[in-house]
Image (cartoon, rainbow, N blue to C red):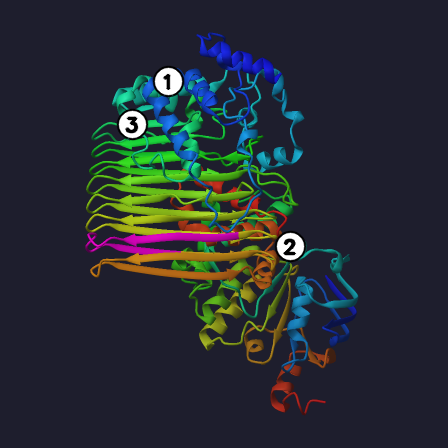
Amino acid sequence: MLKIKNLKADIDSKSILNNFNLEIKPGEVHAIMGPNGSGKSTLSNILSGKKGYKVSGEVLFENKNLFELETEERAHKGIFLAFQYPLEIPGVNTNIFLKTSLNAIRKANGEKELDAIEFLKLVKLKAKNLKFDEEKLNRQLNVGFSGGEKKKNEILQMSILNPKLSILDETDSGLDIDALKTVADGVNSLRKKDNSFLIITHYQRLLDYIKPDYVHVLMNGKIIKSGGPELALELENKGYENFN
Amino acid sequence: MREKQIDKLKDYKYGFTTDIENVRAPKGLNKEVIEFISKAKKEPKWMLDWRMKAFERLKNLKEPNWQKPKYPKIDYQDIYYYSAPKSASEKPKTIDELDPKLLETYKKLGIPLQEQQRLNGIAVDAVFDSVSVATTFKDKLNEVGVIFCSISEAIQKHPELVKKYIGSVIPLTDHYFATLNSAVFTDGSFVYIPPGVRCPMELSTYFRINASQTGQFERTLIIADKGSYVSYLEGCTAPMRDENQLHAANVELVALDDAEIKYSTVQNWYPGDEDGKGGIYNFVTKRGLCKGTNSKISWTQVETGSAITWKYPSCILQGDNSIGEFYSIAITNNHQKADTGTKMIHLGKNTKSKIISKGISAGFSDMTYRGLVDISSKAKNSTNYTQCDSLLMGNKCGAHTVPYIKNKNPESNIAHEATTSKISEEQLHYCQQRGLNPEEAVGLIVNGFCKEVLQQLPMEFAVEAQKLVGISLEGSVG
């Protein structure tokens, strides 16, 4: 599904990622763990299409060169990023944002757009599953939401859009234990043989609830070690500094 | 050609009877031209005298120059002040002759073909639905006694009303452009709502059959008698093809005791091209008088067109307990300029006013909110709330807020809030990551920014206005 070969990324002529390689197959869950400044957020930014980076190497998504696709085209093809800091958009009703988003993606894929009634039915169901306060859906997007609510809102969007590849950028940071479980439930409910996940995190604790197939340790812009779920535990015990 | 027209003019003076449809007054501003207009419209003498008074006064007036957008000097002798609807041979014959960009916009707005043709002055000779619509519509209004016609017709058929109210809100001598309009206005709308009547439908120029080509000096007069209500829609969300560069319209509203007038405008005149060439100068004077107690006037405007927009729809709150409201969205892109806002003049006791202004500037454009809140010493216990928000896109445009606040009454209260923000790269990226293209993203963010004002528009207008907001900003990202 996703193949990253020799990815190099610079910002303001500072090297962030270097010789980065990763392959994610359909249905797999990969976790990337790394300390602050190791290049985790840069990776999610680049995969989502954020501007401002100088990149080289190759990133293929379903055998398509990702660098030739605009941000929204990547979204249409099924890439979803749960933002580390979800944005506030004043005046824009959350439901309307979700509906606009879902229909933009459906339209791009030649699917019928949902009308208001069909959409509300869907969103109600998903919100209920995620224990997301329905009343919040009628508020301005992320405005006045707590940190946890914002993160849950990302997972709600993810579950509505049902993407092929979901990238979770430090979704666990700032969550209390209940919210963490809800987020994990959301991810687990989407786990299917065609849906893949890339979970970016500092901590092992999210991985208690979402069992990854692979864990990668990212340091100084490259993956220094890959392994199974046990690697996360090892990291947690040793700390990043002593890991090398 | 010109001589021929002057000949015609001479003929006209002496009982000219030729069909006025194909007549154009010669260029220039003088007594003869004003007489020509007045006669062409079969006006009574008092109306001509009124125009002449304005013309005399105009000689001593100068164009105002305190506004921010400057414009090249206008040669008033180089303008046609009266031009009856063009003959079919001069109009574009089919929709294919029009600018493809214009057609693209119509498509995006979902404007039906027939409406597109009407907007561009294409003669529609098939059975036109709107004729029957207009007839049913007129019957319904007649039933309740509402008068809705062109101002020319009103001058002939309802002189007592016109005479009483014309110039009662915008005096003949008000300022250069208002006075110019008083001298040379060619047409516009007239509305009278009798006491106690709630107008059964939204009134819109769309339904007035003879609304086309009212031209550059429009004059509108709306009177809501005691206890009545009317909602009036002006303009159209689709871009209007127009060769006239200067538009100096006057709109006067009068609300008597317990009456309410809601006046909504969507202005989308030609803004000029991407390099700022061409475009309309929209210099409009709009003023409402809350004459009676408990009266209310509410202005809502969406200004997206014109090269220069210069207007301040205002309320004079004369009656005790009267209410004035101003809701505005102004959008400038490319090289457009706007200097717009309102004036709330509190004269009566317990008067209230509310101003919500949303300004969006993109490209190389420049936007100024200019507003006056004036609470007189007699306006006890009056309040004003003003909120001015500006949104910038890119770093080559400008936004300015210039509030003038005068409070001469210690028991009254004025509150002013202002914000300036920018659409951030992060917000755009977020929306794009959710599948929206940059233009859809901007449309969504800007509509959110404008929400409070869009909500004030009548339903059928609001949907189109929302699309228009997005379309006006096309090309401003990426």
N-terminal-most mark, 3 or 1: 1
Residue A140 on the magenta segment: no
In this view of the protein, which residue sits in the foreground, B38 or A113?
B38
Residue under label 2: A72
Q: Which labelled disc corresponds to residue B43?
A: 1
Specify the amino acid type for callout 1. Glu
Give the spatial CA distance, label 3 vs label 1.
Answer: 19 Å
Q: Chain of mark 2?
A: A
Q: Report the magenta residues as a range.
A: B367-387
Q: CA distance from mark 1 to mark 2?
A: 61 Å
Disc 3 marks a residue whose amino acid type is Tyr
Q: Residue furthest front?
A: B60
Residue appearing at x 43%, y 19% in the figure:
B35
x%, y% of residue A195?
A: 64, 61
- Local SS, label 2: helix
Chain containing mark 1: B
Discs 2 and 3 carry the same chain letter: no
Circle 3 sits on which residue? B192
Indicate left or right for A63 with A115 as reference. Answer: right
